[in-house]
Amino acid sequence: MLQDRVEEYLGAIYRLRTGEGEPLPLSQLAEYFGFSPVSIHEMIRKLDDGGWVDFHPYRGVTLTERGEASARALLRRHRLWERFLTDSLNIPWDEAHLIAGDLEHAAPELVTDRLAEFMGEPDACPHGGPIPPALQSSEERCLRSLGAGAEARVTRISPETPALLRRIAKQDLIPGRLLRILAQTETETRVHLQDMPEPALSIPETDAQAIWVELM
Amino acid sequence: MLQDRVEEYLGAIYRLRTGEGEPLPLSQLAEYFGFSPVSIHEMIRKLDDGGWVDFHPYRGVTLTERGEASARALLRRHRLWERFLTDSLNIPWDEAHLIAGDLEHAAPELVTDRLAEFMGEPDACPHGGPIPPALQSSEERCLRSLGAGAEARVTRISPETPALLRRIAKQDLIPGRLLRILAQTETETRVHLQDMPEPALSIPETDAQAIWVELM
DNA sequence: AGGAAGTATAAGGGATGCCTTATGATCTGC
DNA sequence: GCAGATCATAAGGCATCCCTTATACTTCCT
C-alpha cells in the first residue's frame, strides 16, 4: 500500500499547494512531474483510496492528516540531507537538492534524525526552507534489536525485497500494525499481533532484520 | 538499460562467488534473493544481453569486466555508507548494513567519494570488508555545472524521473555517451554528441540538472 | 547406461506506474 | 445560456520484475 511513488506525490502536493485549505489542481501536478493528466489522476485516486489525500473533483487535492504528516516528514528528511550534503560534503546546493531527492526515500527517519543530531539540529535547509521538527520520538528500531515484552508499531520494511514484502504482507505485518514481542531467539522472533486471532507469529531472523518499528 | 535491479544482482554475484573464474550457480542466487529459479534465470538472461554477465548454461554466471567494475563500485559505496552510519551516526552495524543497502543505490559516486574524504579515506567497512578504491577519478559533475567547451561522459541520470528518462533516451543521452558542451544559457544547455550526425542538442535547464557526467 | 535431480526455457499471469485515445461531465467567460 | 476549455473516467497498452506451471534438456551418481 505504501508504494514507491506515494511519497513523491505527497511531497509534491505539500510543496506546490498555496494558501490555506485550497485544493491543489491536478494540472499543477501534471506540469510538475511532466506526466499526463490521466496518469496523475489515476495516481491521485490511489492516494485517495489509501487515505493519503482527499480528492475534490474539478477542484484538486488536499492532504489528509496522515498525508500531511508523511509529507512533512519527507520534507524534513529532504532538508536534513541537503544540509548535510552542502555543509559536510561541500556539494553545491543545486546538486544537493537533486541528490537529497533520492536519499530522502532511501534512509529511515533514524538516519536523518541522527544526522540532525550530528549537525547540531539545524533549523533550515541551505536555501532557507525551515526544517520541520521530528514529530513523535520517532526512534525507528529494528525488530531484531528489541527484547521480549516490547510493544511496538511497524513503521517500515527495509530493504524492500519483493519476496520479503510478499511474505510480510501474507502475515499482515504491514506498517501501522501494533505488536508485542514474545521471544527473541537466535533464529527467529516470536511476535503477537494486536487485534489478530492467531496466537503468535514466527519471524525468521533474516526477515526480522528488515522490519522496523517504533517503540510504544 | 541500467534497470533498477541490475546493480542488486551484480552485487549479489560479486559477493556470493567463491574462487577464481568459477561461475556462480543460479541456484545460489535464487536462495540469496528468495526468488524462484525461473525468475533468476530470466533476469540473468537480461544481464547477459546487457553485457553485464556471461551466462554458462548448467554452470552459472560470471561477471564481465563491465559487470565487475559496476559491482565493485557498488560495494565501495555500500561499505563507505556502512562506515559513515556506524562511525558518525552511531548506528549498530547490522542496521547500518541494511540501511547501506538502500543508500548505495540512491546516491551518486560523488557523495560516497566525498564521504570517504570526510572520514579520512577508510579502507575497510565496520566488519572488516575492504573498501575498494575509487577507480577513475570519478568526479561526477552535474551537466549544468560545466562551462562551454567541456568534454564529458554521461555517467548517470538522477533523479530518474520516468518522463525525464524517456526524453533523455529519445535523444540517446544515455550513460557512456561522450559529449561536448557548446553553450550554457539560463534556460538550456547546448551539447554536441560524439559520433552523432545531429549538429547539436538543446537540453532544457531542468533536464540538464539531472544529467551527471564525468569530465574527460 | 539409466534414472533422479537439477537446470533451461516457454508460456501465461499479476502488480505498479506510466502511456494514449476517446467519451462525457463540468466549469468559465462572453 | 452556450461554447470552448478543462477535467473525469473508462479502456487498452507497455515495460519491469516478479510469479507459477509445464516441458525438455543436461548432469551426476549408482
Image (cartoon, coloured by chain):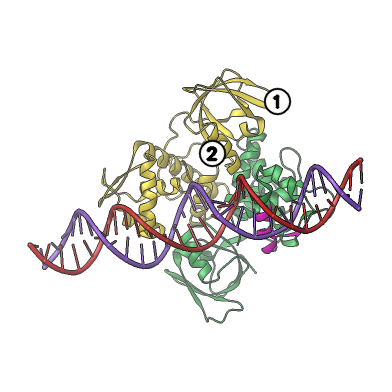
Chain colours: A green, B yellow, C red, D purple
Taking depth in this image into account, of A59 and A10 the one nearest to the observer is A59
Where is residue A24 drawn, in percent x and y?
78, 51
| Residue designated by label 2 | B108
Q: Which amino acid type is shown beneath numbered disc 1?
A: Glu
Asked whether residue A121 is drawn in magenta, I would say no
Label 1 Cα crowd, 10 Å radius (few <14 / some 14-19 / many 20+):
few
Give the x, y percent position of residue A123: 75, 46
Q: Which mark is residue B55?
A: none
Quarter where residue A58 is shown:
bottom right
Residue in the picture at 71% in, 47% down: A29
Q: Residue furthest top?
A: B149
Report the magenta residues as a range. Answer: A41-57
Quick check: A145 above or below B7?
Answer: below
Secondary structure of the residue carrying tag 1 is: loop
User: What amino acid type should be assigned to the residue bearing mark 2?
Assistant: Pro
Q: What's the chain of the residue with tag 2?
A: B
Mark 2 crowd level (few <14, some 14–19, many ≥20, 10 Å Cα): many
**In this figure, which residue is indicated by the disc labeled 1?**
B186
> Residue D5: horizontal and vertical position, in percent?
79, 43
Quote the CA–CA distance across marks 2 and 1: 25 Å
Does the rendering let one see residue A138? no
Can residue A12 be seen here? yes
Q: Which residue lies at the image location 56% right of the left edge and 82% below the top edge?
A: A197
